[in-house]
Image (spheres, grey):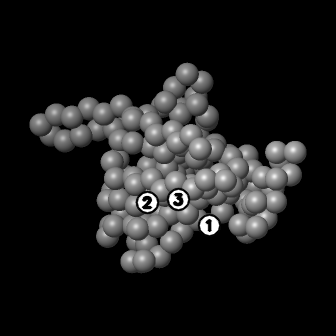
Amino acid sequence: MEIEKLEFHRRDNATGKLTFLESGAGKDISFDIRRVYYIYDVAPGERRGFHAHKKLEQYLICIHGSCTILLDDGSKQENIVLNDPSTGLYVGPGMWREMYNFSPGAVLLVLASEYYDEDDYIRDYDMFKSYLKEKNK
């Protein structure tokens, strides 16, 4: 499993820090951003996610606090801690994801390549494994 983390542009000075990114061909985010959402106020011990996408690409950025992302490509799992607002984690299609271990006050920002489409979701892990098997024939 290849994990892609991207360090965004950051400018620091005496008044604070600024992180920025650009999307489109040849930019930080290769896809056009069509949807943005964020996850916050996650109760202690709760997990989020539990799904994969057929087409959607995403960047996950923990803009405040920290959280852990479990990625599963069907044969290997990896846990990645996000705790830097200037670092994004790419999650491509066909990757199961779960988010957990949210610190108090954590905010996880998600940049998505597509508009919301329920048909793009795989919400059952066994169906995810079947989808990968069928896709890789």
User: Considering only order in the chain, which callout, 2 or 1, is on the residue closer to the N terminus?
Assistant: 1
**Horizontal side of residue 108 vs 15, given as left or right:** right
Mark-to-mark CA distance, 3 and 1 = 10 Å
Which is more N-terminal, label 1 or label 3? 1
| Residue placed under numbered mark 2 in the picture | 68
Residue type (three-letter) at the residue carrying disc 1? Phe
Residue lying at the far left in this picture: please name it. 14
Residue 67, percent from left and from top: 40, 61
Tag 2: Cα neighbours inside 10 Å, few (<14), some, or many (≥20)?
Answer: some
**Closest to the observer, 80 or 116:** 80
Q: Closer to the camera: disc 3 or disc 1?
A: 3
| Marks 2 and 3, how far apart at CA | 7 Å
Q: Amino acid at mark 3?
A: Leu
Graded by Cα atoms within 10 Å as few (under 14), some (14 to 19) or many (20 or more), the crowding at tag 1 reads some
Q: Position of residue 73 (x, y in %)?
A: 65, 51
Secondary element under disc 1, as helix, strand or loop, is: strand
Count of numbered circles on the image: 3
Q: Is residue 95 visible?
A: no
Q: Quarter of the image for the C terminus: give it.
A: top right
The residue at 39%/42% (across/down) is 87
Task: Left or right? Give the position of 11 relative to 9.
Answer: left
Contact between marks 2 and 3 (CB within 8 A): the answer is yes
Identify the element where label 3 is drawn: strand
Q: Residues within 10 Å of mark 3 (few under 14, many from 20)?
A: some
Measure the C-alpha gap from mark 1 to mark 2: 13 Å
Residue 58: x and y, percent? Answer: 58, 46
Report the amino acid beneath label 2.
Thr
Q: Residue at x 58, y 31 (%)?
A: 30
Residue 50: mark: 1
Q: Circle 3 sits on which residue?
A: 70
SS assignment at label 2:
strand
